[in-house]
Image (cartoon, rainbow, N blue to C red):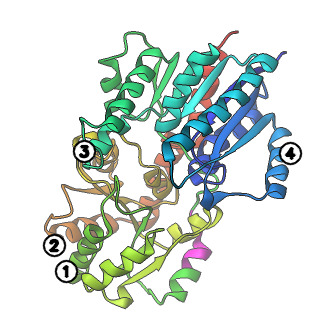
């Protein structure tokens, strides 16, 4: 059987967890099961994740053996950003044009917000079908957080391209029912599929030995460990907001310990000093490898999802929630964080707060009630929910259905 060629466009780096742990993993697992496609994967290689020439060649060979052809585009940053972005896009277009003439791809897939907009342009120029995977109205996030003005050029451009993705894509994959309802107010044709961001639940597992080792090394004892992994600021809570919240919780419950993994270590340390979080009440890491993340999560008792309760946040699908659940962790979440607040209460795998100004006593009571359940039962409930709703198999099944319907 002749294999179908499909272009996959991502704006992040190959080694970025959003690619390595998500879309690339989906493609690899899809190839293992079906081997009916050749994927042409475009990534923009950012400075923090750059591989050297030897590593790139080795990775290309490794992926090519799995019928995934990788095209790394060096991301140009610094001054004259607009011109450099235009150059990056032109470079991408000419490579895609060669693929068009040589392999006649049946579609291009845009993964996440920025790549979705650029994939729309490429689909028009190359005259191929467009598929959007994980559509979210990112322009609304930027406006809600006052990062962009609604009358500004950036907002209006992204809003326009988001509209075109909704209207013109052959298939549109959205992360939850809130987003499905949103896009169906604009989209007249069907083919809207709900599929939350899914992770490799076989890799993201509870590790009892790691839990004991890490907790012993930090002298945590039987404390309740609340873990947060991710950035501060931008479209997340600031470090000041989160550390102030943590400090308030610790004032009520001295048995709480905060495990923070964030690239924003400088500002986090300043916030810790500012809000007097005791040195024996936290552990701060700048980063951990994706392959070892489950070990750190296993050392915790509950995860934290740092999304402010703003109207647009209900369209999101926090990947960290899937990671927490997969490692058997319940989570603490604000209202309107995708569907995670609804799931937390209906499935009894989390606690919900209105915002970080909630009474710390009420929040600590919710945490104590949640963690007061039988530990094994709670861990298994979280794990089972992740496997059935947020595992790679869910994403693979979705992509297989979409790709199987594509014709030349």
Q: Earlier in the sequence, mark 3 or mark 1?
A: 3
For disc 1, the marked residue is 252
Q: Which of marks 3 and 4 is nearer the N terminus?
A: 4
Looking at the rendered image, the disc whose residue lies closer to the viewer, 3 or 2, is 3
Q: Disc 3 to disc 2, how far (Cα)?
A: 29 Å
Q: Are marks 1 and 2 in contact (CB under 8 Å)?
A: yes
Q: Residue at x 41, y 83 (%)?
A: 222
For disc 2, the marked residue is 361
Could you say which disc has been placed on residue 144 in the image? 3
For disc 4, the marked residue is 61
Which residue range is magenta in the image? 206-212
Q: Disc 3 to disc 1, how far (Cα)?
A: 32 Å
Count the marks: how many?
4
Query: Which element type, helix, strand or loop, lies under badge 3?
Result: helix
Q: Disc 3 to disc 4, how far (Cα)?
A: 43 Å
Q: Earlier in the sequence, mark 4 or mark 1?
A: 4
């Amino acid at each position: 059987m002749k294999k179908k060629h499909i272009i996959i466009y991502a704006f992040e780096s190959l080694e970025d967890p959003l690619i390595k742990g998500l879309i690339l993993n989906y493609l690899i697992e899809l190839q293992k099961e079906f081997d009916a496609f050749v994927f042409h994967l475009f990534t923009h290689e950012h400075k923090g994740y750059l591989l050297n020439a030897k590593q790139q060649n080795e990775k290309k060979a490794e992926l090519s053996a799995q019928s995934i052809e990788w095209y790394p585009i060096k991301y140009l940053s610094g001054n004259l950003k607009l011109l450099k972005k235009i150059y990056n896009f032109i470079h991408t277009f000419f490579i895609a044009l060669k693929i068009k003439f040589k392999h006649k791809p049946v579609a291009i897939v845009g993964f996440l917000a920025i790549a979705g907009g650029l994939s729309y342009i490429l689909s028009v120029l190359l005259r191929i079908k467009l598929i959007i995977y994980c559509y979210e109205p990112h322009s609304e996030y930027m406006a809600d957080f006052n990062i962009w003005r609604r009358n500004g050029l950036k907002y209006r451009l992204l809003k326009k391209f988001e509209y075109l993705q909704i209207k013109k894509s052959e298939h549109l994959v959205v992360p939850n029912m809130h987003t499905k309802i949103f896009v169906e107010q604009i989209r007249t044709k069907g083919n809207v599929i709900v599929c939350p961001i899914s992770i490799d639940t076989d890799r993201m597992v509870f590790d009892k030995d790691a839990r004991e080792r890490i907790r012993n090394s930090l002298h945590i004892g039987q404390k309740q460990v609340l873990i947060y992994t991710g950035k501060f600021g931008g479209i997340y809570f600031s470090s000041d907001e989160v550390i102030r919240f943590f400090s308030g919780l610790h004032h009520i419950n001295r048995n709480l310990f905060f495990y923070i993994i964030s690239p924003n270590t400088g500002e986090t340390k300043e916030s810790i000093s500012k809000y007097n979080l005791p040195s024996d009440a936290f552990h701060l890491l700048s980063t951990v490898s994706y392959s070892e993340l489950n070990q750190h999560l296993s050392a915790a008792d509950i995860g934290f999802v740092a999304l402010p309760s703003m109207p647009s946040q209900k369209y999101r699908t926090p990947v960290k929630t899937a990671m927490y659940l997969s490692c058997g962790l319940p989570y603490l979440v604000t209202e309107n964080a995708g569907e995670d607040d609804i799931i937390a209460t209906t499935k009894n795998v989390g606690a919900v707060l209105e915002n970080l100004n909630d009474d710390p006593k009420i929040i600590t009571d919710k945490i104590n009630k949640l963690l007061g359940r039988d530990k094994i039962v709670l861990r298994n409930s979280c794990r089972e929910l992740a496997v059935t709703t947020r595992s790679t198999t869910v994403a693979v099944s979705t992509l297989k259905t979409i790709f199987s319907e594509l014709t030349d």
